[in-house]
Amino acid sequence: MREAVLQIQARRKAQHKLPGWFANDHIFYPSLLALEQCSSEATARFKAGLATGRTLVDLTGGMGVDTAAFSSGFEQVTHVEQNAELSEITAYNLGQLGITNVRVVNARCEDWLAAPPEPADWLYLDPARRDDAGGKAVRLQDCEPPVLDFREKMLKTAAHVLLKTSPMLDIDAAVRDLGQVAAVYVVAVENEVKELLFHLTRTAEPEIFAVNLAKTGEVAEEFRFTRRGEVAAKVAFGLPEAFVYEPNAAMLKAGAFRSVAAAFGLRKLHANSHLYTSTDLRRDFPGRAFRLVAVSKLDKKALAAHLPGGQANIAVRNFPMTVADIRKKTALRDGGDTYLFATTDVDNRKIVLVCEKA
C-alpha cells in the first residue's frame, strides 16, 4: 500500500519535471527524494547538447535522468551509482525507455575513478549537496563525493569533465578552486536559475554562458562573456530613457553587468542598479524590455496618478526598501499591466520607474 502511494505521489511530481518519463506507464520511481534531486528533462537535454563523443561516464548516476539524455549523443554511456537498489531501478527504467547503450555499474564514484576500465571522452558529475546537518551545501568543499580531491584524476581519465553544482555557488570562487575551467553555464528555466555547469579541460580563461531555457528545454536566451571582458567593458551611464531593460535571472547570477550594456549599446542607470535604458528598443535583450511611462518618487499620491486600478507589479533594484515595505507604504495590490522598478539613478536619487511591457 505504501509503495503504491509513493508511486502516485512521484508520478504527480514527474508530470511537469519529467514529462517524457511521466508519459511511460512502466516507469518505477525510486523515491520522492531522488525525484527532487534529479535534473529536469529540460536541463538534462541542454546538458546533452553540450557533450558528444564515443563514451561518457555519469559518475553520480542517481535515477538516470541525465544518463538517459546523454545516451542520445554517445555510442556508450556508463551509469555509476553506489546505491545497489537505485542501480537496479535505473537499469529497469532505461530499458522501459528503450535505451540500449547504457551500462549500469553499482560502485562508488571514487572506486570507479581509482581503476577506470578504460579512458572516457567525457565524465559527468552531479555531487550531493547536503551537509552533515541535512542543509544544502553551497561550497565545492562540502559536496559529496569531494570533487576537489580528484579533479586531476578526472582530467587524466577524460578529455572533458562536466560538473553540475548548486545555483547558489559563487562562480568566481569555484573557477579558482577548480582550475582548468573552459566554460561556465548558468542555466535558468523560465527565468529561474536551476543549476551551474562547469566544463573542465586543460585550458586558460573560462567563457561564461548565461542560458535561459523554455520549459521545453529549448534555449530562449543566451549570452556569453568572459570575466576579463566584463572588467574591460566600456559602460555609459545615464538617466532613464524611452525603454528600460531588466536582465534575466541567469544574467544576474552570471554577473554580466557591464558586458551586456556594451554588447547592446545600452546605458546603465547606476553602477549597482543593474537596470539599463535606451532610446530605441532592443527586442533581443536577454531579459525583459519595458516602455517607460513615467519617473516618479516613492509617494502614494504621485504613483496613484499612473495607477488608477491601484495595482502594480513591483521590483526592487538597488533600493533601501523591500517590495513588502513599498506595498505597505503605497497600498498597491499585486498584479496588473504596470511594472514599478524602485531603484537608484546615476545621480544617486531614489526613484520609481513606472513601466509597461514593450
Image (cartoon, helix red, strand yellow):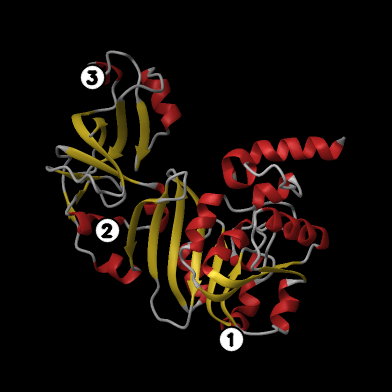
Is 261 in front, or is 285? Answer: 285
Decide which of tag 3 and tag 1 comes sooner along the chain.
Answer: 1
Q: Which residue is tagged 1?
A: 156
Whole-percent x, y for residue 245 in the image: 26, 43
Mark 1–mark 2 contact, CB under 8 Å? no
Instruction: State the CA–CA distance, disc 3 to disc 1.
Output: 62 Å
Q: Which residue is tagged 3?
A: 306
**Residue reaching furthest right?**
1
Is 33 in front, or is 332? Answer: 33
Quarter holding the N terminus is: top right
Decide which of tag 3 and tag 2 comes sooner along the chain.
Answer: 2
Report the mark closest to the observer, 3 or 1: 1
Whole-percent x, y for residue 139 in the image: 59, 63
**SS type, badge 3:** loop
Report the mark closest to the observer, 1 or 2: 1
Figure quadrant of residue 98: bottom right
Instruction: State the CA–CA distance, disc 3 to disc 2.
Output: 32 Å
| Amino acid type, residue under disc 2 in the picture | Arg
Q: Residue at x 82, y 63 (%)?
A: 84
Whole-percent x, y for residue 169 in the image: 53, 59
Instruction: State the CA–CA distance, disc 1 to disc 2.
Output: 36 Å
Numbered tag placed on residue 258 in the rendering: 2
**SS type, badge 2:** helix
